[in-house]
Amino acid sequence: MSVLTPEQEEQKRAIYEKMNPRRRKFVDRIGYDKWDPFAMPKDPIEIRKDPTNRTVQQLVTDFLRSREAHQGYSEAYASGAMELAVGVLRREDRYEGMLEFGAWYKNLMEKEGVSDAD
Protein backbone atom coordinates (compact mmCIF):
# COMPACT_ATOMS: atom_id res chain seq x y z
CA MET A 1 0.00 0.00 0.00
CA SER A 2 1.24 3.50 -0.76
CA VAL A 3 1.91 6.15 1.89
CA LEU A 4 -1.27 8.00 2.79
CA THR A 5 -1.59 11.73 3.28
CA PRO A 6 -2.87 12.90 6.68
CA GLU A 7 -6.30 13.59 5.11
CA GLN A 8 -6.45 10.07 3.65
CA GLU A 9 -5.41 8.59 6.99
CA GLU A 10 -8.29 10.49 8.65
CA GLN A 11 -10.72 9.19 6.02
CA LYS A 12 -9.40 5.66 6.48
CA ARG A 13 -9.96 5.84 10.26
CA ALA A 14 -13.47 7.30 9.78
CA ILE A 15 -14.38 4.54 7.29
CA TYR A 16 -13.09 1.88 9.68
CA GLU A 17 -15.02 3.24 12.65
CA LYS A 18 -18.30 3.43 10.68
CA MET A 19 -18.01 -0.19 9.51
CA ASN A 20 -20.28 -2.85 10.88
CA PRO A 21 -18.55 -5.35 13.22
CA ARG A 22 -18.48 -8.15 10.64
CA ARG A 23 -16.66 -6.04 8.04
CA ARG A 24 -14.35 -4.62 10.72
CA LYS A 25 -13.43 -8.19 11.68
CA PHE A 26 -12.32 -8.80 8.07
CA VAL A 27 -10.09 -5.69 8.14
CA ASP A 28 -8.62 -6.78 11.49
CA ARG A 29 -7.84 -10.21 10.05
CA ILE A 30 -5.84 -8.79 7.11
CA GLY A 31 -4.40 -6.03 9.27
CA TYR A 32 -5.44 -2.41 9.46
CA ASP A 33 -2.07 -1.25 8.07
CA LYS A 34 -2.39 -3.53 5.02
CA TRP A 35 -6.03 -2.60 4.37
CA ASP A 36 -6.50 -0.11 1.53
CA PRO A 37 -10.01 1.37 1.38
CA PHE A 38 -8.91 3.51 -1.57
CA ALA A 39 -7.87 0.62 -3.83
CA MET A 40 -9.10 0.80 -7.40
CA PRO A 41 -11.70 -1.84 -8.29
CA LYS A 42 -10.53 -4.79 -10.35
CA ASP A 43 -11.33 -4.89 -14.06
CA PRO A 44 -14.45 -6.85 -14.94
CA ILE A 45 -14.14 -10.34 -16.31
CA GLU A 46 -13.13 -10.35 -19.94
CA ILE A 47 -16.17 -10.77 -22.13
CA ARG A 48 -15.37 -13.13 -24.94
CA LYS A 49 -16.33 -12.02 -28.41
CA ASP A 50 -16.14 -13.76 -31.75
CA PRO A 51 -14.43 -12.35 -34.86
CA THR A 52 -17.61 -10.38 -35.68
CA ASN A 53 -17.28 -8.69 -32.25
CA ARG A 54 -20.43 -10.35 -30.85
CA THR A 55 -20.79 -11.98 -27.45
CA VAL A 56 -22.19 -15.50 -27.09
CA GLN A 57 -25.55 -14.06 -26.03
CA GLN A 58 -25.68 -11.75 -29.05
CA LEU A 59 -24.83 -14.60 -31.42
CA VAL A 60 -27.48 -16.91 -30.01
CA THR A 61 -30.12 -14.17 -29.95
CA ASP A 62 -29.41 -13.30 -33.59
CA PHE A 63 -29.49 -16.99 -34.55
CA LEU A 64 -32.78 -17.69 -32.77
CA ARG A 65 -34.40 -14.60 -34.27
CA SER A 66 -33.40 -15.81 -37.73
CA ARG A 67 -35.01 -19.20 -37.04
CA GLU A 68 -38.17 -17.76 -35.49
CA ALA A 69 -39.44 -16.46 -38.84
CA HIS A 70 -39.21 -19.96 -40.38
CA GLN A 71 -40.18 -22.15 -37.45
CA GLY A 72 -40.71 -22.11 -33.73
CA TYR A 73 -38.03 -23.61 -31.53
CA SER A 74 -38.02 -25.47 -28.27
CA GLU A 75 -36.11 -24.68 -25.11
CA ALA A 76 -33.83 -27.64 -25.84
CA TYR A 77 -33.09 -26.19 -29.29
CA ALA A 78 -32.16 -22.80 -27.80
CA SER A 79 -30.10 -24.48 -25.06
CA GLY A 80 -28.18 -26.49 -27.66
CA ALA A 81 -27.44 -23.35 -29.66
CA MET A 82 -26.16 -21.61 -26.53
CA GLU A 83 -23.97 -24.57 -25.54
CA LEU A 84 -22.48 -24.79 -29.02
CA ALA A 85 -21.83 -21.04 -29.19
CA VAL A 86 -20.02 -21.06 -25.83
CA GLY A 87 -17.92 -24.07 -26.84
CA VAL A 88 -16.99 -22.62 -30.22
CA LEU A 89 -15.97 -19.26 -28.75
CA ARG A 90 -13.82 -21.09 -26.19
CA ARG A 91 -12.32 -23.08 -29.07
CA GLU A 92 -13.08 -26.40 -27.40
CA ASP A 93 -12.39 -29.36 -29.69
CA ARG A 94 -15.69 -31.09 -28.93
CA TYR A 95 -17.74 -28.15 -30.18
CA GLU A 96 -15.44 -27.42 -33.12
CA GLY A 97 -16.05 -31.03 -34.18
CA MET A 98 -19.80 -30.66 -33.81
CA LEU A 99 -19.81 -27.45 -35.83
CA GLU A 100 -17.67 -28.88 -38.62
CA PHE A 101 -19.73 -32.07 -38.75
CA GLY A 102 -22.94 -30.01 -39.08
CA ALA A 103 -21.50 -28.01 -41.99
CA TRP A 104 -20.15 -31.18 -43.65
CA TYR A 105 -23.46 -33.01 -43.26
CA LYS A 106 -25.42 -30.11 -44.72
CA ASN A 107 -23.12 -30.06 -47.77
CA LEU A 108 -23.46 -33.84 -48.15
CA MET A 109 -27.27 -33.58 -48.09
CA GLU A 110 -27.22 -30.81 -50.70
CA LYS A 111 -24.78 -32.70 -52.92
CA GLU A 112 -26.93 -35.82 -52.84
CA GLY A 113 -30.16 -33.85 -53.39
CA VAL A 114 -31.75 -34.84 -50.10
CA SER A 115 -33.90 -32.21 -48.43
CA ASP A 116 -34.15 -31.71 -44.65
CA ALA A 117 -37.82 -32.76 -44.72
CA ASP A 118 -37.07 -36.27 -46.03
Image: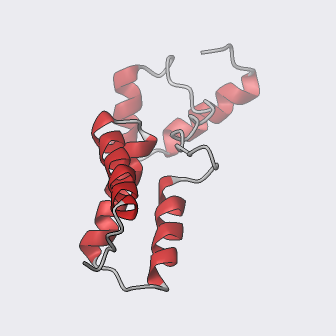
Q: Residue furthest front?
A: 112
Name the residue at 66% across, 35% down: 11
Name the residue at 51% across, 40% down: 45
Closer to the camera in the image, 39 or 72: 72
Residue 43 position, x and y percent, is 58, 36
Residue 21 appears in the picture as rendered: no
Closer to the camera in the image, 103 or 71: 103
- Position of 76 with respect to 72 (left or right) is left
Tell me the quadrant of the picture where the N terminus can be found.
top right
Name the residue at 68% across, 13% down: 3
Residue 66 position, x and y percent, is 51, 75
Label tally: 0
Closer to the camera in the image, 61 or 110: 110
| Coloring applied to the structure | secondary structure
Residue 106 appears in the picture as rendered: yes
Q: Is residue 70 above or below residue 88?
A: below
- Position of 57 with respect to 26 (left or right) is right
Residue 111 position, x and y percent, is 39, 59
Tell me the quadrant of the picture where the C terminus can be found.
bottom left
Residue 53 position, x and y percent, is 64, 49
Q: Is residue 115 above or below residue 47?
A: below
Name the residue at 29% across, 70% down: 77
Closer to the camera in the image, 33 or 72: 72
- Position of 26 with respect to 3 (left or right) is left
